[in-house]
Image: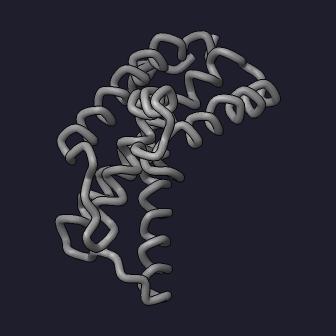
Amino acid sequence: MSPALRSSLVFGKAISAGFRGLVQAAVIYLLALCMHITIRTEPLTILGVLAAVLLGSALFSTFSLIIACIVKTRERFMGIGQLLTMPMFFASNAIYPLELMPGWLRIIAQINPLTYLVDALRALMIVGGVSVHGYGVDFAVLFGAFFVLMAGAVRLYPTLVE
């Protein structure tokens, strides 16, 4: 047992994942610049990208923590994690635009938080990129999903440390 609050442990884990995501985003920016790929480099857009990456990494870290709390073994975690994350990836706008998806898949994609993360990152990073949903909606969905997953992870976390 730890004297720290469960919420502090879960939030710390989420922030840790967020900072790892920031390092990865910095590497992507450096590689893009070295390869002379045209990306947006205005300070506000870079701050927006960093905020989206931090929030997205924290969100999916709490999602992983919930899975870990439920399954409790590494082997099951890896299997179930892949079983859940791969469909989330394919049921988002990461590969295909929403307008090309069949109606049933578009509904699933609009519930998927990854869709809003990809939308924000594309609009912020690509020259001439436009957010389909708008930055306010993108970040509101990401914050909302993060808080819901955070609450779930805090509730389930004791089962992991008992």
Name which residue lies at 71% across and 17% down.
71
Q: Nearer the viewer, residue 118 or 30?
A: 118
Q: Nearer the viewer, residue 46 or 5?
A: 46
Give left or right: position of 92 versus 132: right
Q: Position of residue 15 (x, y in %)?
A: 41, 42
**Which quadrant does the C terminus fall into?**
top right
Name which residue lies at 33% across and 25% down.
147
Q: Nearer the viewer, residue 19 or 2?
A: 19
Q: Position of residue 4 (x, y in %)?
A: 43, 23
**62 w.r.t. 52: above or below:** above
Which quadrant of the view contains residue 65? top right
Colour approach in the figure:
one colour
The reply to whether residue 144 is visible in this rendering is yes
Q: Position of residue 17 (x, y in %)?
A: 49, 45
Name which residue lies at 45% across and 40% down.
114
**51 w.r.t. 79: above or below:** below
Name which residue lies at 62% across and 18% down.
69
The reply to whether residue 9 is visible in this rendering is no
